Amino acid sequence: MRYVSTRGSAPALDFAGVTLAGLAPDGGLFVPEQWPRFSHEEIAALRGLPYATLAARIMQPFVGDCLTPERLQELCEEAYGRFAHVAVTPLTQLDERNWLLELFHGPTLAFKDVALQLLGLLFEEFLALEDRALTVVGATSGDTGSAAIDALANRDRVEIFMLHPAGRVSDVQRVQMTTVLAPNVHNVAIDGDFDTAQAMVKRLFSDRDVTSAINIGAVNSINWARLMAQVVYYFAAALQLGAPERKIAFSVPTGNFGDVFAGYVAAQMGLPIERLVVATNINDILFRALSDGDYSAGTVTPTAAPSMDIQVSSNFERLLFDLGDRDGAALAAQMAGFEQTRAMRLTNAQRDGASALFCTARADADDMAQAMRWAWEECDCEAIDPHTAVGLHAARMLEWSNDVPVVTLATAHPAKFRDAVERATGYRPSLPPRVGDIFAREERFTSLSGGYEDVRKFVLDTAIYRA
Ligand SMILES: Cc1ncc(COP(=O)(O)O)c(C=O)c1O
Ligand SMILES: N[C@@H](CCOP(=O)(O)O)C(=O)O
C-alpha cells in the first residue's frame, strides 16, 4: 500500500514511511492511494474474533508488506493487552435504539489510547529497523497528550514535546500529562487555544531549521496510523450488532474530524454504515460546513467538553480530498485560501458527497447536561462524560428509520470530566484504580507565552535526539 498527500506534491510513501513522517512535506495529510475493500463474506467472517485479531485483519491491507501478519498480530496483542476490558471496546445498550461504544478502557481513559498504544509500538519497531530516532511534536486539548505520553514515556529512540493550552484542559487531563517525569517527555503549556497549538505543530513540520536539526514526527491524527487503528472499533461494534446483514449508524463527538473520518474509512472498506453523525459542541465549524457549506473558523469558546473546543478540524482536509476527485493541486489552492482568510466555501461536489453519508447536529451547554442527566436517570445510572453527551444528544434528536441501531462513541471516561458530570447529575465518578495516585505526584511542565518562536527555540534547545 502506498500513501499520497492531500496536497498532491509530496512523494508517495509506504506505511512505515507515513508512520514516521506524520505530516507530508507539502503540508498535506497522507491518505492511502486507494481504499482496501472487504466483500460481504469477508466481513461476515470477521464476526466473533478477539479484538487484537480483528485489528490485525482490518489493518493488514494498510500496513502492506511493512510488517508480516504474524508481527502485526503480536503488536496488536501487546497494545490491546493493556486495556482494562477483555472486549477492549465493549458496547452498552441504553434503550431499544441507542448504544454506547465504550472507548475509554485504556490506560488514560479516552479513545486516543486505542490508536496510541499501537502507535508507540509501531514507532519502536520502525525506528529500530531504520536505526534512527524520532522527535515527536504534538498538540493537545487534553486527551491526545495524556495517551501519547503514556504510550511513549521511557521508550527508546523517541522523545515527545506536547503542547497543551494553559488552563483549558481538565485537572485530570493536565496531571495525566505533567506528572510523567520520564526524561523523553517534555510538557509545554502555551498561551492560547488548541488551534494555536495545532498550527504551531504544523508550522514546525515546514520549518527548514527544525527539520534539518531533528527528525520530526507526529502523534496527532495528522499521523495516518492513528486513524487506521480507529477504523477497527467501527467494525467491532457493527459486527456485534448484525453487520454486514444490517446497517448501523454512528454518532461521533467531533473536534478534529479524526474519529469520524475513521468511520468514513470503514464505510469505504465495505462496512454497511447507514449514517455518520458529526456531533459538535458550540465550536461548530463542522456543523456549519456540513449543513450549509460554510467552513469558516470563529474564535474558540471554552465548553464543558474541552477536548472538542476546536475550530480548525485538521482531518476535514482528508475528506475534502476524497470527495474532490483526489485533486491535490485543487485542494492545495483551496487550503491555501483557508489558511489566509480562515474561511472557505465547500464546492457542490464536496457538499453532495458529504451528505451521502454524513449528517450533523450541534449541542450547547443545556443539551450536554440534559444528555448526561438522561443517561443517568433513564438508563440505569449510566454516567457519561460531556463529549459523549454531545454525541448522545445528536443520536437522540435525529430521526432514524425503524430498525437502525445508533451507536454513540463514548470517547472518554466520565471521571476524566468529573466536575461537569457532577454538575449535571449530582454524581461524582471516581477515577479507576489503573490511573493511580496522579494527584499526589509532582508535576513538571514548561510555560511558554511568546508564540511560535518561543516554542521553536524550546524544541531545538531541548531535543535529545538530532537528525
Ligand atoms: C474525549 C474526546 N471526544 C471527542 C474528541 C473529538 O475527536 P476528533 O478530534 O477525532 O474529532 C476528542 C478529541 O479529539 C476527545 O478527546
Ligand atoms: N481532542 C484532541 C485534539 C487533538 O486531536 P488529534 O486527534 O488530532 O490528536 C486532544 O485531546 O488532544
Image (tube, grey):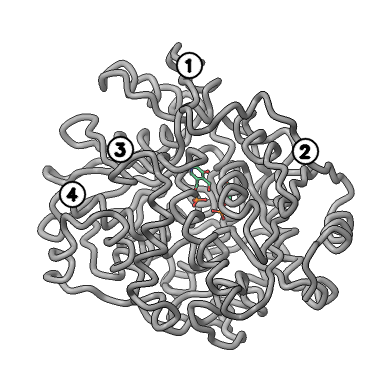
Q: Residue at x 38, y 81 (%)?
A: 34
Any part of residue 196 in sight:
no
Identify the residue position indicated by label 1 in the image.
Answer: 428
Q: Amino acid at mark 2?
A: Arg
Which residue is label 3 attached to?
Answer: 100
- Residue at 36% x, 62% y is 264
Of 114 and 418, nearer the camera is 114
The residue carrying mark 2 is 444
Q: CA distance from mark 2 to mark 3?
A: 35 Å
For label 4, the crowd category at 10 Å Cα-Cα, with few meaning under 14, some 14 to 19 and many 20 or more, is: few
Furthest-top residue in this view: 426
Residue position for label 4: 240
Q: Position of residue 40 (x, y in %)?
A: 14, 69
**10 Å crowding of disc 1: few (<14), some (14-19), many (20+):** some
Mark 2 vs mark 3: in front: 2
Q: Is residue 249 visible?
A: yes
* Disc with the residue nearer the chain's start (4 vs 1): 4
User: Of residues 462 and 358, which is closer to you in this image?
Assistant: 462
Please state if 175 lies on the left or on the right of 396 as rendered. Answer: right
Q: Nearer the viewer, mark 4 or mark 3?
A: 4
